Image (tube, rainbow, N blue to C red):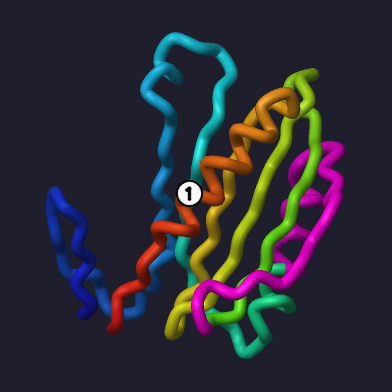
Amino acid sequence: MAIYEVDEFSFEVPDGYVDRSTNLFFPREAMTQVRTQNLVITREPRTEETVLQQASKILKVFSTKVPGLKIIGQRDRALGALPGREARAHATQQGHPIYQRYYFVGHYGTLISVIATSSRAQSVQCDAVVERLLASLRLKKL
């Protein structure tokens, strides 16, 4: 069995299970605000497709599940020597215009997804958060 480790705990993952874990981050002030930025980092198994193809399929699924989601831009963006894909989108959530920034990178058998969400008015700050995260992201050798 694979061992799943975080700062607080570790456990044996049952045979036949795959890591599709999600980490969700909010700014400290989010506890007192109705709408704020958030950052979601997910892991899921890589497919035989390229990162571009797998990311495109994920974005297509999102566009069917998020009302009014419109991809406003996409481009290839490597993380070091690893191929990556990023996209930006607009949507409306509970009547409020939102902005989302996506980044996908393959690492061994895992696709890592970074999804940052904010109000459209905070898109510049949201982009800055993603840029800082990507600049600091260090993938561990397996």
Query: Left or right of 69: which side holds 20?
Result: left
Secondary structure category for the residue under label 1: helix
Whether 117 is among the magenta residues is no
Q: Position of residue 105 (x, y in %)?
A: 55, 71
Residue pictured at 63% horizontal, 31% vertical: 118
Residue extending farthest to the top is 32
105 to the left or right of 56: left
Which quarter of the figure is the C terminus placed in? bottom left
20 sits left or right of 94 in the view: left
Q: Position of residue 53 (x, y in %)?
A: 73, 78
User: Depth check: 45 or 97 in front?
Assistant: 97
Q: Find out whether residue 77 is within the magenta segment.
A: yes
Q: Which residue is mark 1?
A: 132
Identify the residue at horizontal 35%, vertical 79% (top origin).
16
Q: In the image, is residue 100 above or below residue 97?
A: below
Q: Is residue 16 above or below residue 28?
A: below
> Alpha-carbon neighbours of circle 1 within 10 Å: few (<14), some, or many (≥20)?
few
Q: Residue furthest bottom?
A: 48
Q: Would residue 19 appear left or right of 127 to someone viewing this image? A: left
Q: Amino acid at mark 1?
A: Arg
Q: Specify start and end residues of the magenta stretch as a single range.
A: 56-81
Residue in the image at 80% along x and 39% along y: 90
Q: Residue at x 60, y 33 (%)?
A: 125
